[in-house]
Amino acid sequence: MNVGIICEYNPFHLGHRKQIVRIREDFGADTGVVCAMSGNFVQRGHPAIFDKMRRAEAAVRCGADLVVELPVPSALSSAEGFAAGGDDYVTKPFSAGGVSTLSRLCDGLCFGAESPDSEELLTAAQALLSEDFPPRLREQMATGKSFPAARQGALEAMGLSGSLLESPNNILAVEYCKAILAQHSPMRPLPILREGSYHAQTPDAENPSASSLRLCLEQGTDITPYLPREAARCFENAPRHALLSGERAVLYRLRTMTEAEFEALPFGSEGLWRKLMHAARQEASLEAVAAAVKSKRYTRSRINRMILCAFLGISQAQMVTEIPYVRILAFNDRGREILRSVKKEGFFRNAGQPIDHPFQDLERRWENLYSLFQTDAPGAPGGNGKERVFFQSKFTNP
């Protein structure tokens, strides 16, 4: 049996290893663990704190068998798109999205949730996919509610509990179930209880949140006690990346964009692209730009994703373009056996492997731009195709 995980590992910590251990406790020591991981940019609209190759290596050294990369358009999508791949996944399934990718390799999808009841999550997912949901959602949006609040209200209007969509892990859990249902995936959902606080400012000793660890790094606090030893070694002396380190480059891009380029951005519906354009031409910092655009209706994460897409040159059309391959970042002996089962498809390609496809040019551009977010000083361009897949010859069971 192979179990998939859709993840960011930003950074990989003790809680992530605990999930891998739990999978093998529940399904057997010989269970394969396959991770579809965000690359150098993550869903909250920021660069990953450590680069994708180090994070993938950490995952395999800590018990994962295979790590493949979620393409940037999928990684920078809303919760729906992050789970399935692209923000138009129902009418135009994103071939390299998390669920569709893992469906080629896995029998189940494991994820943390505050309410780890698969039947409850599937019922909510069915409701959100039903024909009754869109008109209910429009009614709620017409009252001026934000999209998350409107979704909760629409679900309650259908006789279900909207509180299920209050916590971030439950929201993603329902989206995973939606994608499994919409794509007729052979995977079954395998939710486990999410322990610890997602928004905690101080790391929990046994269940730290990635956000609390990033805050520690910003404050100069050592995070080694909250990482598996193998992961700590991967991140030791590794360059760190932060959005504010590339602020001038991002502001330059925003200030030189044309109106047509703003209009073509993803997440810019209902005139939001115009608000961003005006803010970019008036405000002096990224914080001020985001604050000027944010409102009760539009979340900060959506604004951040929109700004990062503008910097990376990602349009709405590119967000829903199907990608015929995903990159392999790291694997071990068991991961190699898993890959052999789909080798003839040619869907999985090694990191750095040249591919005759227009998407490769975009990949290289994004890799080059990632280095501008390095915290000490801008790094050398990274989109030179020199990435090397990490291989661990001997399987390690954490």
Image (cartoon, rainbow, N blue to C red):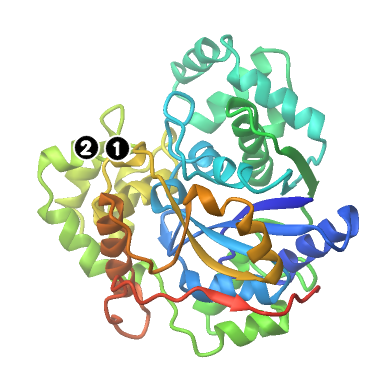
Mark earlier in primary sequence (2, 1): 2
Label 1 sits on what residue type?
Gln
Badge 1: how crowded within 10 Å, few (<14), some, or many (20+)?
some
**What is the x, y in percent for residue 344?**
52, 50
Question: Relative to residue 169, is residue 251 depicted above or below?
Answer: below
Q: Let me know if residue 326 appears in the view.
A: yes
Which residue carries the number 2 mark?
264
Mark 2 → mark 1, Cα distance in angstroms: 6 Å
Who's the residue at 67% across and 12% down the image? 158
Who's the residue at 62% across and 30% down the image? 178
Please report contact status of discs 2 and 1: CB closer than 8 Å, yes or no. Answer: yes
Which residue carries the number 1 mark?
316
Name the one closer to the observer, 178 or 296: 178
Q: Quadrant of residue 24?
A: bottom right
**What is the x, y in percent for residue 180?**
64, 33
Question: Relative to residue 386, is residue 267 depicted above or below?
Answer: above
Label 2 sits on what residue type?
Ala
Which type of secondary structure does the marked residue at label 1 adopt?
A: helix
